[in-house]
Amino acid sequence: MAKPDGKPSRRLALTGLGLAALGGGVLLARKADRGAGGHDAYFTGLSRALTEAKLVQPTLIVDRARLRQNIAAVRDTLAGKDLPVRVVVKSLPSIDLIDEVAAGLGTNRFMVFNAEMLGEMRRRRPDGDLLFGKPMPAAVAAAYYDEFGVAHGPAEPQWLIDTPERLAEYAAIARAKATAMRVNFELDVGLHRGGFTSPEALAAAVEASKAEPLLQVSGLMGYDPHVPKTPDPKAAFAKAQGVYAKAIEVLKAHLPGDPRRLTLNTAGSPTYALHAQGTVANEVSIGSAFVKPVDFDLKTLSRHVPAAFIATPVIKALPHMQIPSIEGLSGVMRFFDPNTDQAFFIWGGHWLAQPVSPPGLQTNGLYGLSSNQELLTGSSKVKLKVDDYVFFRPNQSEALFLQFGDLAVFEGGKINGRWPTFPVSA
């Protein structure tokens, strides 16, 4: 209400300010329109290649040129460092993919994580040096010798040991099978996921191994992917290196010869570049960096590029998204989030992956996820119709590469090959 002098009252002024703030808050609550048309030139080329190859079902694609670019990035980063690469099989579960990486780096060292992949690699690469990346139940080791026979050379697996109890179980298998076994000790270098935590505990395990004539200590493994994600990566890396250095001193004190003749494994995709600047270990493990899923968008992998994508066709394209039983709220949803305007149902879905093309697509938490016909929404700016492809980028490789059958190899603008994957395994 105005005062007699014609000036607005304090209450009216405050009310006006409140309404203005509310209006501004509503506008601020609105999400930006992320739609940007259709596919860019790269994904348009991928779409064309898939159409020509008649691949109209969900397909996992490996871009061979980008894969080779990532191999070259590893090779260049490690040039002159005397740090051989151990290829992580679970992250690249296709023998052709593994061969491409191993050949590009000149390595026959591999890291395996389950019985199925151990068997596959032993049959396909009998001369490969296989190190387990996680401890296996003793029954897995017993079954391996039942299938492949007793140890017959230096290419036998390096079994990972994390506790005195597991060491004792493996020693019992060695005696029962009358076979030599190589044992590698897992170190807790800061990840706190198990492994030996002190020089004293490691020394006791080494001495226990020496007391078993059939056990051979083959080295150490210290995985440190936590380092880039800590508040102070430099300090975390230095601390991990210190733990590892003390473990090497244990080997030096309790075993004959130079410990560096053994497998002193470390790193992983997130940290291999840090070890290239100086490390106490003598080899690094790398897997996911060669295809660079979303979870590996890290500063330490800035030289790497995404090399794997999921493609799937649009089954249904609807002009507007509607949520069952609350259809009347669809307009309100579109107001606050223009990226919920159009509705696209795709073949498959609910993958550990993020939609990347065309830009602006998103899942809908109210509608829910589906492994059969996933709903993706986009603004009116998204150009997508039935039978067009939607492209996702995997969050990680190991959880997805076994879900789509043979990998489609994209090279020179075409799908020019299919790489079979390993049998499905956890």
Image (cartoon, rainbow, N blue to C red):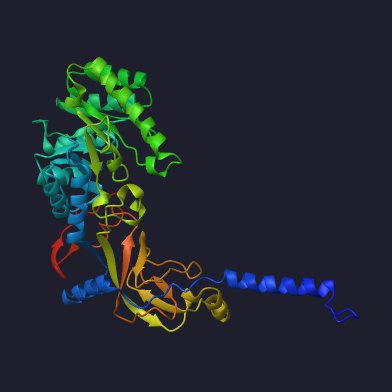
Closest to the observer: 3 or 70? Answer: 3
- The quarter of the displayed image where residue 187 is located: top left
Q: Is residue 41 above or below residue 222?
A: below
Q: In this rendering, would 404 be left or right of 52? A: right
Q: Residue furthest front?
A: 5
Q: Is residue 321 above or below residue 215?
A: below
Which residue shows up at 36% across the image and 18% down it? 200
Which quadrant: the N terminus? bottom right
In this rendering, does residue 267 appear at all? yes
Q: Is residue 102 above or below residue 255?
A: below
Which residue shows up at 21% across the image and 59% down it? 66
Q: Position of residue 404 (x, y in %)?
A: 25, 62
Which residue shows up at 42% across the image and 78% down it? 343
Q: Position of residue 222 (x, y in %)?
A: 31, 33
- The quarter of the displayed image where residue 220 is located: top left
Which residue shows up at 35% across the image and 67% down it? 356
In this rendering, does residue 56 appear at all? no
Q: Residue furthest right?
A: 4
Q: Residue furthest bottom?
A: 319
- The quarter of the displayed image where residue 399 is located: bottom left
Q: Position of residue 165 (x, y in %)?
A: 33, 25
Closest to the observer: 108 or 424? Answer: 108
Closest to the observer: 378 or 372? Answer: 378
Q: How many marks?
A: 0
Q: Position of residue 335 (x, y in %)?
A: 55, 78
